[in-house]
Image (tube, helix red, strand yellow):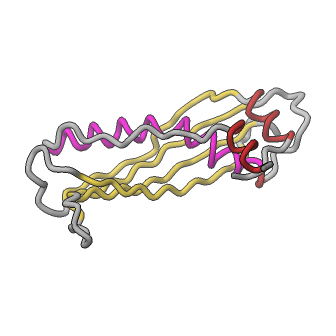
């Protein structure tokens, strides 16, 4: 886990999520669906990007582009071919106070995107996956809850 700098801690304390914007989605069945009740495995490939917004020096956005592949999980060593591909793009708009004491440099925004923003975007991705699967007649398919490691626990582990 990356070092929790003073700038990152301040950003986490002072940032405000002002908007979540779904930007695009695509869903496609690419093979036969497994029998109802079959175990499935999700593979999620996120790509996160950040940009400062036109809302002055202290506004920024985090965009998440997610590619999700769903396949039957038979427990065998060899993986089944995927039967469903999903793509979802969502962005979060953030603001910090005008008197924020730190520069919103690329490294700071990247660290925020990989930790906090991912926690903000993930529930929207989960809802999209669940809804898309239901529309294809695949009820009950849901991405797991994203759990962030405790900063306190990670800090204690690092100092040992």
Which residue appears at 19% of the width and 60% of the height?
74
Residue nearest the observer in this picture, 81 or 67: 81
User: Image point 16% across, 45% down: which residue?
Assistant: 136
Drawn side of residue 14 relative to residue 6, left or right:
left
Is 42 colored magenta in this rendering? no
Q: Report x, y in % for residue 139.
A: 18, 38
Q: How many marks?
A: 0
Instruction: State the residue in front, 89 or 143.
Output: 143
Q: Is residue 106 left or right of residue 48?
A: right
Q: Residue furthest front?
A: 160
Give the magenta range: 108-136
- Foreground pick, 3 / 105: 3
User: Where in the figure is residue 60, as x and y percent of width and height?
Assistant: 70, 41
Q: Is residue 132 above or below residue 18?
A: below
Q: From the top left corner, tell me how far across and down residue 95 is, in percent.
A: 72, 31
Q: Residue at x 12, y 54 (%)?
A: 34
Q: Residue at x 23, y 43 (%)?
A: 133
Magenta stretch secondary structure, dominant: helix
């Amino acid at each position: 886990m990356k070092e929790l700098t003073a700038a990152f801690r301040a950003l986490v304390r002072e940032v405000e999520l002002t908007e979540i914007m779904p930007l695009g989605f695509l869903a496609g069945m690419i093979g036969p669906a497994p029998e109802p009740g079959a175990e499935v495995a999700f593979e999620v490939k996120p790509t996160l990007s950040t940009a400062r917004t036109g809302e002055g020096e202290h506004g920024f956005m985090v965009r998440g582009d997610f590619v999700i592949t769903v396949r039957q999980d038979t427990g065998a060593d060899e993986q089944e071919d995927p039967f469903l591909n999903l793509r979802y793009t969502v962005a979060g708009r953030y603001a910090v106070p005008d008197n924020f004491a730190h520069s919103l440099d690329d490294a700071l925004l990247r660290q925020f995107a990989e930790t906090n923003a991912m926690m903000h975007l993930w529930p929207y991705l989960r809802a999209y996956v669940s809804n898309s699967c239901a529309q294809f007649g695949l009820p009950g398919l849901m991405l797991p809850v994203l759990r962030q490691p405790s900063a306190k626990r990670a800090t204690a582990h690092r100092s040992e």
